[in-house]
Amino acid sequence: MAGSVKSILVLARRDHGEGMRVAAGLTIFGHRVRLVFMNGPVADTEANAELAELLELSDIAPESTSPEMAGALPVLDAASLAAAIAASDHVVNV
């Protein structure tokens, strides 16, 4: 349905920075967006710090599947990730 609010899960698997850009961009349309970083911790770079600020402005609280991110972000186990996927209208892999 055009114009309806969707629940979108962005899985940042290959490119964490691109995942942040995509997630923030999807909020422009009013969708509920959830971002999960996968396959390791997010690199501590200036570019990623700037994108993290964009996430804050977009009201996106990222999560991770990487145990190394514990303490910095909520870490999802396999069951929680599966539940997030099942609860989403759309899943975007980046």
Image: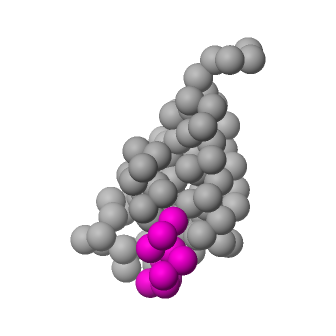
Q: Please say which color scheme the image uses.
A: one colour
Q: Against 77, is 25 above or below?
A: above
Lateral position of residue 35 relative to residue 1, left or right? left
Principal SS element in the magenta part? Answer: helix
Residue 54 location, x and y as percent?
Answer: 48, 57
Residue 26 location, x and y as percent?
Answer: 62, 42
Residue closest to the far right:
2
Q: Residue at x 69, y 49 (%)?
A: 92
Q: Against 12, is 60 above or below?
A: above
Q: Against 78, is 91 above or below?
A: above
Residue 44 location, x and y as percent?
Answer: 44, 84
Name the residue nearer the viewer: 60 or 9: 60
Q: Residue at x 42, y 49 (%)?
A: 57
Q: Residue at x 56, y 29 (%)?
A: 30
Residue closest to the far left:
71
Name the residue nearer the viewer: 57 or 8: 57
- Residue 44 lies in the magenta-colored region: yes
- Residue 25 lies in the magenta-colored region: no
Q: Is residue 59 visible?
A: yes
Q: Is residue 80 visible?
A: no
Q: Quadrant of the N terminus?
A: top right
Residue 12's quadrant in the figure?
bottom right
Residue 47's quadrant in the figure?
bottom right
Q: Residue at x 30, y 70 (%)?
A: 72
Residue 51 location, x and y as percent?
Answer: 51, 65
Lateral position of residue 19 relative to residue 63, left or right? right
Q: Which residues are magenta?
A: 42-51
